[in-house]
Image: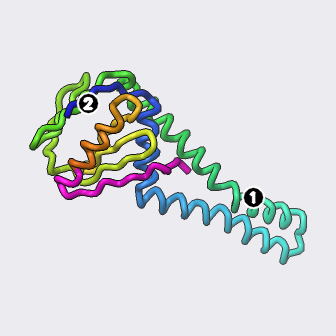
Amino acid sequence: MTLKYTLREDDYLNSQLFISSKSKITKKNRKKNYLIVTFSLLIIGFLMLIRENNFFAYYLLFLGILALFLYPKYQAWFYKRHYRNHVKNNMQNWFNESNVIEFNDNFIETSDKTGLVKINITEVDQITEINEYFYIRTKSNQYLIVPKDRVDDESTRFFLTTLANKLNIEFVSELNWKWR
């Protein structure tokens, strides 16, 4: 099977967000930052309340409660902004360039303006489907991005599920995945 398509800036951004959302380190850091910010505000607020500095106590407690509910949304916005800047600064030369992925019996050949890459088919360790993309992950944690709106969605899904079964790897369907 051969897939031909172009990748746009938002394709690279969405792939960065998806990969980040699956990273154990990123999840751990986001959770740690959330807990530090929220509980620091609440603890300092309670300490101020004990010292009878009511204005600062109520102010910090109010901020702590706000952080409890709003910090995850702020953090998602912050990370998205970070990855958007990363994509713009580091991947701008790849936007709107033609990409070809050809699946052979033993190799996956990808070609773009930078050249040709051969990947042993046995190096693929997971295929993931989300609402707008298929992601083909290798054992070295590299991803091939396949946008559904620029390929034949049904035949590509059939081929990739068949490939996953043939290679005895996981085909993950996360059609409800959303950046948070």
The residue at 53%/58% (across/down) is: 30
Question: Residue 155, how many percent across, how many down?
Answer: 29, 37
Residue at which label 1 appears: 66
Is residue 36 or residue 176 the one in the foreground? 176
Asked whether 143 or 130 is in front, the reply is 130
Name the residue type under label 1. Answer: Leu
Q: Is residue 174 magenta?
A: yes
User: Mark 1 or 2, which is nearer the eye?
Assistant: 2
Taking the image as shown, residue 79 lies to the left or right of residue 159, namely: right
Looking at numbered disc 2 in the image, what kind of residue is underneath it?
Leu
The one of 131 and 126 positioned closer to us in this rendering: 131
**x and y, in percent, of residue 171 in the image:** 31, 54
The span picked out in magenta is 164-180
Residue 24 appears in which quarter of the rendering? bottom left
Is 76 positioned to the left or the right of 71 in the image? left
Q: Earlier in the sequence, mark 1 or mark 2?
A: 2
Q: Position of residue 76 (x, y in %)?
A: 58, 49
Residue at (15, 51) in percent of width and height = 122
- What residue is pinned by disc 2? 3
Q: CA distance from mark 1 to mark 2?
A: 47 Å
Give me the residue at 22% from left, 48% from top.
162
Q: Nearer the viewer, residue 175 or 44?
A: 175
In this rendering, the answer to whether 89 lies above or below 58 is above
Within 10 Å of the Cα at label 2, are there few (<14), some (14-19), or many (20+) other Cα atoms? some
In the picture, the quarter occupied by the N terminus is top left
